[in-house]
Structure formats: C-alpha cells, structure tokens
Image (cartoon, rainbow, N blue to C red):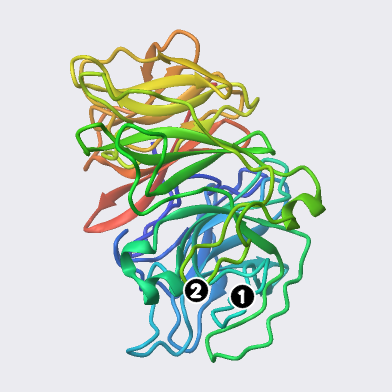
Amino acid sequence: MKQVTFAPRHHQLTNINTWTPDSQWLVFDVRPSGASFTGETIERVNVHTGELDVIYRATQGAHVGVVTVHPQREKYVFIHGPENPDADWHYDFHHRRGVVTEYGETRNLDAMDITAPYKPGALRGGSHVHVFSPNGENVSFTYNDHVMHEYNPAHDLRNVGVAVPCGPVEVTAQHPREYSGSHWCVLVSKTTPAPQPGSDEINRAYEEGWVGNEKLAFIGDTLSVKGEKVPELFIVELPKTAQGWKQAGDAPLAGTDTTLPAPPAGVVQRRLTFTHQRAYPGLVNVPRHWVRSNPQGTEIAMLMRDESGVVQLWLILPEGGEPRQLTHLESDIQSAFNWHPSGNALGFVLENRIAIADAMSGSVRFLTTDHGNPPSADAVVFSPDGNYIAWMEETAGFRQLWITETGL
C-alpha cells in the first residue's frame, strides 16, 4: 500500500476512468465530501513522484468536480456548476453542465436551451458523471431537467443521456443562463412519473455503464405489484450513425413544456433482470454502485443480494438471461467496483480491505491488510496498465489517495 496524496485537504476520485492513459497520474477533485459540491479545482497527482498539477480552476463563484479521463488522451471531462450563482440559479441537479479540457482549452460539452421552442441537441438542465465510451468518441451522463423542475418537480426524473461529437450546438441565448455546447446531446432512457406496478416502466434511470461502444446499461427503478421500488438492470442500443442521433422518435428530442426530452428513433429500452419474486429483489443501492461491463463487452456486472441477504457480485449477458452469481461471500461487498483492464478480475472493498475477485471462478484475493480507516466505498479503480488499483481513505482527518499493486 502506498499513500500518494498528503495535503491537509480532501481528494475525491470519481468511480471510473480516474487514471491518465499512461497509468502515471490519478485525477481528482477537492470537494470536502461526496455530498458537498464546493471544490474549485480539478487536479492530478503523479503516483510515483507525488508531483501535483492543477488541470482547471473555476472562477466567478463556480465549483467543479467529478472528473474522468479520456481512454487514449490527456483529455478531461467534469461537472461545472453555474458562474455567479444566486438565489434563483445555483448549483443543483438541474443546474450544472459538463465541460471538456484538453491542452489547456476548456469548452462546454452540453448546450443549455430553456426557452421554447427548445433546440434539438441541446439540454434543458444539468448533466452529471460524464464518462467517455471505450473508444473515446461519445460521453454518457445522468441528467435532470430544469424545464420539468419548474413545471412540476415530480416530473423532473433522473435519466441517462449521451453526448456525441456531431455538434457544435449553437444556442442564441434568450435567457442569461443559456449557452452553446460542443456536442450533440440526447437522452437515451425513457421514464414515467407513475410506472405501472409489475411492468417494465421506470421512474428513474441512473448509474449507467458502457457496454462496448454502442450500448449503455443502467439501473432503472421499477415498481413491484405491491408498489414497492425495485431497481432492475436495463440496456439500450444506441444509434450507429451521426444522422441516427439526430432523428426524432415518437416524441421530440428536445422535449416540450410538459414532457422530458425523448430518445432518438430506434433507441429501444430493454429490461435485463426480473427479480421481483426473489427473497431480496432488485439491484442494491447501498453500497452505491455503477453497473459495469467487462472490456470485451460480453458480461455486465452488478451488485445484488443472495438468498441469505449478502451483497454479492453478479454477471449477466447483454442479451439477457439468468444472472450468474459470481461471488459467494459471507459478508457484504462494501463499495462500487471496477473490472481489471484484462477482464479477468474485478476490484472492490471487502471486510474493510481492497480485494479482487476472479471473473470466472469468483474466488477472492485480498490486496491489502491493515488500514488506518476503512477504504471509501465511492471508488476502487484499476490503472489502465492493470498494475495498480487506487482508492480513497481517511488519513489524519482528510480523504487521501492510495494505491497498491494488483499482481495481475
């Protein structure tokens, strides 16, 4: 185990893609806690020398955080809160945007248009947790909608969207909070405020993960026959051409005054898990985790409870079928997880230690022994070369970054 940050402040890793492609630097923000969005810089640390770089510094009272890295280049995408926040417009789920920084130049990823008629390719609210597709072409995100929030907060449903590089999307600002963006952005999930109990309808889509470059899996909250929330796994197939992203389906891409933006034509939402009848139905929300495909795009991993109520790793094919229970542990997996770049193992926190599970057998090996404090549940992330795994841990009262070798 090696501690790589030492400054008396917090260091926050995102749940995936936190290493530069050369596996030399960890990228982070400086929020004081996961729930407080008050960091002003995006930074990186060299895991071997301890050298620190500031990648971006916010101005005009804005805050930034939740940074991830392009898989092939030193290109960064992160959340940017509003400049000059005031009582009417401050950081919130529906008041934030993605920005991309490369070679010192920073641009808005998503455009904002909250004045009807709404512009296709622009968003009407806040994007969050931006993750490049494996080939670096597109960016997934979760989303909340300002127009729906003003119309009826109960209709401002969390959704999943994608930014594609067939912009820019130019917005003629009719509201002081509108702006243009570099990418064409659409929602790809479909939600409804009142799902039919026992159906495949959902009122929330979240914690998405790329499955190859042309599919996205995510968690969707269904309702049981009794009306209880059951998070299930869903997948969408994405358009394969630039024109496909711009073709509206049965509802406007940009939404209306009373409806959310809608997915492009041909984007079909398909449910993969059917767990309503299990003793412990649904994917778990604690620990919070993001569904993750292996690098080959052939299996999707998620966390569910076994018949005894223990949180285990499960795998399922993108085509569907019965999930396969991978781990058979006596105590809960305690964190979000990620795949090793080889696809042969997954890393997570177990028994307050860093552990990896073999992706075929489910056998578990511990990489660490004695921790001063338990590793954070937020992020356990392999380096691109597979030699290291990084996590956060409270040290002398501050969240610091740590790594250890994987032996893989």
x 38%, y 59%: residue: 11
x 69%, y 48%: residue: 265
Q: In the figure, 368 relative to 68: above or below?
A: above
* SS of the residue under disc 1: loop
Residue 41, given in percent of the width and then of the height, sits at: 48, 72
x 22%, y 21%: residue: 310
Q: Which residue is mark 2?
A: 257
x 56%, y 46%: residue: 17
Q: Give the crowd class for mark 1: few <14, some 14-19, many >=20 residues within 10 Å.
A: many
Residue 44, given in percent of the width and then of the height, sits at: 53, 59
| Disc 1 versus disc 2: nearer the observer | 2
- In this picture, residue 348 sits left or right of residue 161: left
Name the residue nearer the viewer: 145 or 330: 145
- In this picture, residue 28 sits left or right of residue 245: left
* SS of the residue under disc 2: loop
Say if mark 1 contacts mark 2, CB within 8 Å. Answer: no
Q: Give the crowd class for mark 2: few <14, some 14-19, many >=20 residues within 10 Å.
A: some
Quadrant location of the N terminus?
Answer: top left
**Inter-mark Cα distance, 1 to 2:** 9 Å
Q: In the figure, 202 relative to 398: above or below?
A: above
Q: Is residue 334 visible?
A: yes
Name the residue nearer the viewer: 167 or 33: 167
Residue 330, given in percent of the width and then of the height, sits at: 21, 15
Specify the quadrant of the image occupied by residue 175: bottom right
Quadrant location of the C terminus?
Answer: top right
Q: Which residue is mark 1?
A: 118
For marks 1 and 2, the one nearer the N-term is 1
Type of the residue with mark 1: Tyr
Residue 74, given in percent of the width and then of the height, sits at: 69, 56
